[in-house]
Image: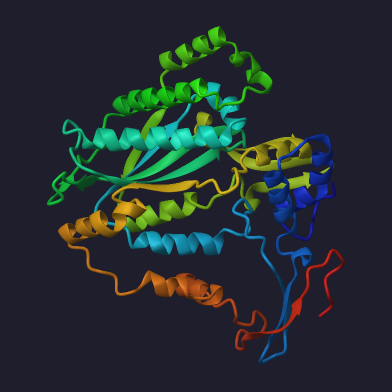
Amino acid sequence: MNLLMNKMTEIQDIFREGSKEYAMKHKLPFHIHKTIGDISSCRTAELGGHIDECDDCGHTRISYNSCRNRHCPKCQTVAKEKWLYKRQQDLLPIGYFHVVFTIPQELNYLTLTNQKEMYSLLFKATSETLVELSKDRKYLGAEIGFTSILHTWGQNLINHPHIHCVVPSGGLSVDGQRWISSKKKFFIPVKVLSRKFRGKYLFYLKKLLDENKLKFLGENDHLAQQDILKLYIDKLYSKEWVVYCKPPFGSAEAVLQYLGRYTHRVAISNNRIVQAENGFVVFKWRDYADNNQQKFMTVTTEEFIRRFIMHILPTKFVKIRHYGILSNRSRVTKLKRCKSILGVKKSSESLKNLSNLSVVELFLKITGIDILKCPCCTKGKMERKRKVNPSICSPPKL
């Protein structure tokens, strides 16, 4: 692969150079093929676009269409900002905790070959753990609401499924009349969380196994034998599972900043790609086991693609979910009650109006950036002159 010197090397460049060869060697599901194709074509002539011209200085530019695939590092900005604006309406004037649930590495390959089932199980075990323990009077005795975000990768792009949860420091009393605040430190001991989570997860895992809903492929094919499978489950019961709670956020604004970093993140961003040439890719990563040191990793192009596509989620799989008072069913009633108790003023702006805004209007409203302003003279407005049809040929001349 030739190193691209005129612009930053991107994941798109790596896919455009190496994905066809990779696909010839490996049998890939349709949704993987589609994601690779979308990222490879994003904002290129292959997807078409339009030509704009400044109404003041006459400057012209081609704007190619985005693929809008949720795994594309170029297509997350508007979706993220719109999502964050909606979440702003849900924030309460209290502290929030950041809790992370991680499954043991022994489950990684089984998860990779049964993504939909195992990721759903991870959400189920995590949510039930938090909901049930928070209702226990020993810890809080209230109904909480929280947002869960699935991540499947580590900094080095290996398979590392875990869930980030943003949990408020309190909840609504059972009778719905009071807000019960939690302790400054997280109200459930981490060891209690870990044991409950482990029990929940393995209970539902055994249920999936009993119902023959999991596939045993590759290095896990030996688990199809019942005696080996029993030893495998017993080993997981005897292992300590990792659950940790970070210090609470200082403000509601800090919660949004955190969510913005995590919600629409893909496995690796373009700014971490250092170089791609001669069949190798170099990227930056942080080694949390070595004092958070930034390091550089070199892998073959084929290995980079393999690691990236491990984190492409099944079609329509929901990676951000809300529970308790933040669930869709309770947001109108219970969340509204919480706001009333805590004295939160009703927002004067309607979310319905937000959804009716164009991309240009939405971007201006949320970021303050007018993407129609001429980048050349900065005075005129870019007006659409004509459409550019999708093409596999070279881009049109201006």
| Front residue of this view, candidates 112 and 376 | 112
Q: Is residue 251 visible?
A: no
Colour mode of the rendering: rainbow
| Front residue of this view, candidates 51 and 334 | 334
Residue placed at 42% from the left, 55% from the top?
Answer: 257
Q: Quadrant of residue 227?
A: top right
Residue 186 spot, x, y in % from top left? 27, 37
Residue that sits furthest to the bottom in the current view:
56
Q: Quadrant of residue 384?
A: bottom right
Q: Is residue 7 visible?
A: yes
Residue 246 spot, x, y in % from top left? 36, 39
In this image, 153 relative to 192: left or right? right
Residue that sits furthest to the top in the current view:
227
Residue 342 spot, x, y in % from top left? 18, 58
Q: How many marks?
A: 0
In the picture shown, does residue 344 fall above or below 361?
A: above
Residue placed at 34% from the left, 51% from the top?
Answer: 327
Residue that sits furthest to the right in the current view:
393
- Rendered-image quadrant of the C terminus: bottom right
In this image, 192 relative to 357: left or right? left
In the picture shown, does residue 104 fall above or below 369?
A: above
In the picture shown, does residue 225 fall above or below 373?
A: above
Residue placed at 75% from the left, 58% from the top?
Answer: 41
In this image, 171 relative to 63: left or right? left
Residue 306 spot, x, y in % from top left? 71, 37
Q: Quadrant of residue 45?
A: bottom right
In this image, 344 relative to 41: left or right? left
